[in-house]
Image (spheres, rainbow, N blue to C red):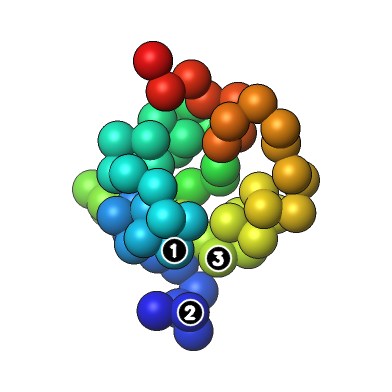
Amino acid sequence: MQDDLVLTVPEMARVLKIGRTLAWKMVWNETIKSVKVGRTVRVPMAAIEQFLNAGKPAGIGGVSNA
């Protein structure tokens, strides 16, 4: 999975060790960049790396778990 250029949202969740719901919230809120390919959503590994390097403090990407 680490050699893939793009991941599905559930794959991204596994990489970041977060739940699928939070992963989808991050995509919907544009906390992490994604691309739509047909009817599917893909997250580029570069976007995940950019998110991790940004080091946002308030939870993951500032997304509330509430």
Q: Residue at x 52, y 61 (%)?
A: 44
Q: Residue at x 32, y 44 (%)?
A: 19
Question: Residue 13: image x %, image y %?
Answer: 38, 53
| Disc 3 element | helix
Label tally: 3
Looking at the rendered structure, the kind of residue marked 1 is: Val
Q: Residue at x 38, y 35 (%)?
A: 22
Q: Tell me the number on the disc at residue 2.
A: 2
Label 1: which residue?
15
- Tag 3–tag 2 contact (CB < 8 Å): yes
Mark 2 vs 1, N-terminal side: 2
| Disc 2 element | loop
Camera-nearest residue between 57 and 13:
57
Residue placed furthest toward the bottom? 3
Mark 3 vs 2, N-terminal side: 2
Question: Residue 55: image x %, image y %?
Answer: 74, 44
Looking at the rendered structure, the kind of residue marked 2 is: Gln
Question: Residue 10: image x %, image y %?
Answer: 29, 55
- Tag 2–tag 1 contact (CB < 8 Å): yes
The residues bearing labels 2 and 1 have C-alpha atoms spaced at a distance of 8 Å
Q: Nearer the viewer, mark 2 or mark 1?
A: 1
The residues bearing labels 3 and 1 have C-alpha atoms spaced at a distance of 10 Å
Residue 42 visible at all = no
Q: Is residue 61 left or right of residue 37?
A: right
